Image (cartoon, rainbow, N blue to C red):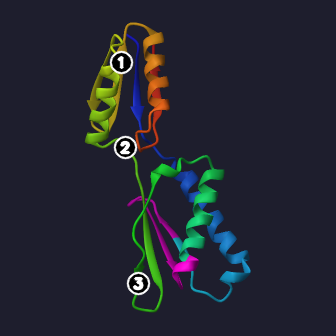
Amino acid sequence: MPTFDVVSQVEMHEVDNAVNNTRKEIVTRYDFRNTKTQVDLDKKEKKIKILAGDKMKMEAVREMLMNQAAKRKLDLKSFEFQEIEPTSDAAFKREVNIREGIDQPTAKKIVKMIKETKLKVQASIQKDQVRVSGKKLDDLQAVISLLKGADIGVPLQYVNMKG
């Protein structure tokens, strides 16, 4: 029976490239000369840590990072920006969580949407992904089209198509 998996994954090497390009852009910008501005990626924790001298520079770094991520074809919904917090040395810090996987409420929402179509397919939640199976490839492609058009709130990819 044909199947595919609905997943939410981020290519960490592309995130790393976006962070490195953001660092290079900070070094070349005149308004960032002689300021303490840092952008670091923690690959294990899947977090980006930003340190800047003031809130205006923090927003500028955010814009640079988002532009670099978009150039690398990363879905911007994967980046979850935390609140800006002051640090002890008159600077500000902010963490950016990189979201991967589909959480349970979102997975349930996806399964419900698929069931409401009345297509002859089955959707099941498996850890942080949703597996969709059906007898006809056309039905599976209709589900993919449905999910592409829906605003789920997380970036989705469709992998392991087996027919």
Q: Which of the two labelled residues, at mark 1 and mark 2, occupies the earlier sequence position?
A: 2
State the image coordinates of residue 28 (x, y, percent, origin top left). 73, 75
Look at the picture and state if 66 lies above or below 23. above
Look at the picture and state if 36 lies above or below 121. below
Residues under labels 1 and 2: Cα distance?
24 Å
Q: Quadrant of the N terminus?
A: top left
Residue at 58%, 78% (x, y): give it: 57
Camera-side mark, 1 or 3: 1
Q: Quadrant of the C terminus?
A: top left
Q: Residues in magenta?
A: 40-57
Left or right side of 103 for 139:
right
| Dots 2, 3 in contact, CB < 8 A | no
Residue at 53%, 47% (x, y): give it: 75
Disc 2 residue type? Answer: Gly
- Residue extending furthest toward the top: 135
Query: Can you identify the residue that label 2 sits on?
Result: 101
Disc 1 residue type? Answer: Thr
Disc 3 residue type? Answer: Pro
Query: Can you identify the residue that label 3 sits on?
Result: 86
Q: Residues within 10 Å of mark 3 (few under 14, many from 20)?
A: some
Residue at 38%, 61% (x, y): give it: 45
Camera-side mark, 1 or 2: 1
Q: Residues within 10 Å of mark 2 (few under 14, many from 20)?
A: many
Q: Which mark is residue 117?
A: 1
